[in-house]
Image (tube, helix red, strand yellow):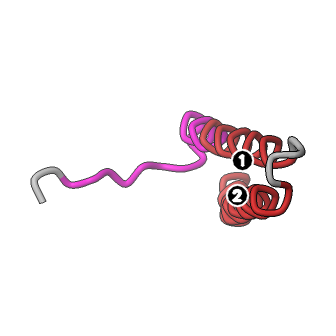
Amino acid sequence: MSAIAIVVRFMHILVPIAFALIIASMASALYFMMHDKGKSKRMVWSLATRVGLSISLFLFILFAHWMGWIQSTGIPMGR
């Protein structure tokens, strides 16, 4: 198996896991917002974690494109 195929397989696993972690962080922020009533900073930390995960995923996808591990398919203009 080539190195590119390994990276693509890794990307197919990493991206859904990252999305699941982002959704879980948002859900925990909602839970803390409803139950803590502003008495702790857990909601803020959950949202900060979500932002960090989102930025990390975006930068990783940009890096993977720059390295040639993934290719853009393009969006047809005028459709």
Snapshot quadrant of residue 41: top right
The front one of 12 and 34 is: 34
Snapshot quadrant of residue 34: bottom right
* Image: magenta residue range: 60-76
Query: SS for tag 1?
Result: helix
- Badge 1 crowding class, 10 Å Cα cut-off, few under 14, some 14 to 19, many 20 or more, is many
User: Does residue 3 appear in the picture of this structure?
Assistant: yes
Quadrant assignment for the N terminus: bottom right
* Location of mark 2 (residue): 26
The front one of 30 and 49 is: 30
Please give left or right for residue 61 compared with residue 6 in the image: left
Residue 61 placement (x, y as % from top left)? 60, 44
Q: Residue at x 80, y 53 (%)?
A: 37
Snapshot quadrant of residue 60: top right
Residue 57 placement (x, y as % from top left)? 66, 45
Quadrant assignment for the C terminus: bottom left
Residue 32 placement (x, y as % from top left)? 81, 57
Asked whether 23 falls inside the magenta stretch, the response is: no
Residue 50 has which mark?
Answer: 1
Tell me the kind of residue under disc 1: Arg
Tell me the kind of residue under disc 2: Met
